[in-house]
Image (tube, rainbow, N blue to C red):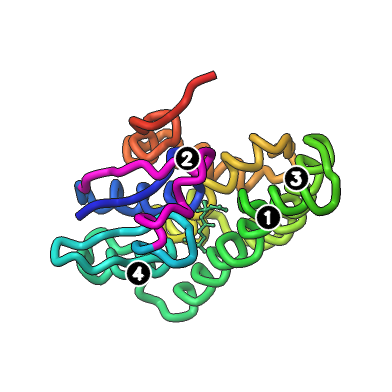
C-alpha cells in the first residue's frame, strides 16, 4: 500500500499513527502542500478534494478521509483494535475524535488559512490567533470530557482512534502557540502517547520529507 501524505499534515499524521499501532508498513509518498502539489492533476486524480492523506491499496483502490482510512485499517487489520468493544464507549470515543477531525482541524486547514490571509487581509499574527482560538475552544470541551476519566488514554488503557487524532492536533496547537498547560488531562494523554515507539515513528519530524528549520 502507498500513503500519499505530508509530514506536517495532521490528517496524514493520524493515519501514520494508526498504521504504526497496527504494525502495518506502507510506502510513503510526499505531496508537498507548501508547493501546491495537492492541486496538481496527478494528485487530483487520487483525491478530487485536493487533500492528503490518500491510502492507495494494492489493487489500486484509493481511500481518502483520514477517519475512513483508519476505519478501513481497523477492519483489514483488526489487532490491536482502534476502538473498544463496548458500544457506548465506542460512540463516545468516535465523538471525541470527530470533535478534532470534523470540528477543530478543518478551521486551520492550509487552504482556509490562505483564504483568510488573502481575502481578509490577515497577517501572521491574526492567522495564528484565529487557529489558536478554535483549537483552544475545542480542547476546552475535550478537557472537560477527559477530566471525568481516570485512565491513561481517553476512557481506555490503550491508545484508540482518539489518540490518533489528539496527538497531531496537540502538535498543531503547539505550533499555533496554544498553551497546553490549560488542558492538563489532554497534555497527560499526549505525553503518554509520545513515550510510545509507534507515536515517535509517526511524528512529523521523523518523516523523510520533513523540513527542519
Ligand atoms: N477531513 C480530511 C481533511 C484532510 C485535510 O484537510 N488535509 C490537509 C492537510 S492536514 C490538506 O491536504 N490540505 C491541503 C490544502 O488545504 O490545500 C481528512 O481527515 O482526511
Secondary structure found at label 1:
helix
- Mark toward the start of the polypeptide (4 vs 1): 4
- Give the mark toward the camera: 4 or 2: 4
The residues bearing labels 4 and 1 have C-alpha atoms spaced at a distance of 26 Å
Q: Which residue is mark 3?
A: 132
How many neighbours does mark 4 have within 10 angstroms: few (below 14), some (14-19), or many (20 or more)? Answer: some
| Segment colored magenta | 26-44
Q: Which mark is residue 192?
A: 2
What residue is disc 1 on?
Answer: 112
Q: How far separated are the C-alphas under marks 4 and 2?
A: 23 Å
Which residue lies at the image location 38% right of the left edge and 34% below the top edge? 200
Secondary element under disc 4, as helix, strand or loop, is helix
Q: Position of residue 9 (x, y in %)?
A: 49, 46
Q: CA distance from mark 3 to mark 1?
A: 14 Å
Q: Determine crowd level at label 3: few under 14, some 14-19, many 20+ residues with C-alpha closer than 10 A.
A: many
Asked if residue 127 is positioned above or below residue 98 in the image, the reply reads: above
Mark seen at residue 71: 4
Q: 43 or 207: nearer the eye?
A: 43
Left or right: residue 65 compared with residue 183: left
- Label 1 CB-ligand 1 distance < 8 A: yes
Question: Upstream in the sequence, badge 3 or badge 2?
Answer: 3
Residue 11 at x, y percent in the picture? 48, 53
Question: Is residue 133 on the magenta stretch?
Answer: no
Q: Residues within 10 Å of mark 1 (few under 14, many from 20)?
A: few
**Position of residue 203 in the picture relative to residue 118 (left or right):** left
Amino acid at each position: 500500500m502507498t500513503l500519499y501524505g505530508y509530514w506536517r499534515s495532521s490528517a496524514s499524521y493520524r493515519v501514520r499513527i494508526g498504521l504504526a499501532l497496527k504494525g502495518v508498513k506502507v510506502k510513503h509518498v510526499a505531496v508537498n502542500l507548501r508547493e501546491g502539489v495537492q492541486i496538481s492533476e496527478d494528485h487530483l486524480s487520487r483525491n478530487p478534494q485536493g487533500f492528503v492523506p490518500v491510502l492507495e491499496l494494492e489493487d489500486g483502490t484509493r481511500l481518502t478521509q483520514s477517519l475512513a482510512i483508519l476505519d478501513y485499517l481497523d477492519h483489514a487489520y483488526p489487532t490491536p483494535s482502534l476502538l473498544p468493544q463496548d458500544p457506548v464507549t465506542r460512540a463516545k470515543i468516535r465523538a471525541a475524535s470527530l470533535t478534532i477531525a470534523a470540528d477543530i482541524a478543518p478551521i486551520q486547514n492550509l487552504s482556509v488559512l490562505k483564504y483568510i490571509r488573502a481575502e481578509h487581509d490577515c497577517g501572521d499574527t491574526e492567522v495564528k490567533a484565529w487557529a489558536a482560538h478554535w483549537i483552544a475552544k475545542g480542547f476546552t470541551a475535550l478537557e472537560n470530557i477527559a477530566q471525568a476519566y481516570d485512565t491513561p488514554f481517553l476512557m481506555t488503557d490503550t491508545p484508540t482512534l482518539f489518540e490518533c487524532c489528539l496527538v497531531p492536533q496537540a502538535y498543531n496547537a503547539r505550533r499555533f502557540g496554544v498553551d497546553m498547560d490549560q488542558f492538563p488531562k489532554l497534555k497527560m494523554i499526549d505525553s503518554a502517547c509520545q513515550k510510545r515507539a509507534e507515536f515517535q515513528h509517526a511524528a512529523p519530524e521523523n518523516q523523510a520529507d520533513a523540513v527542519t528549520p
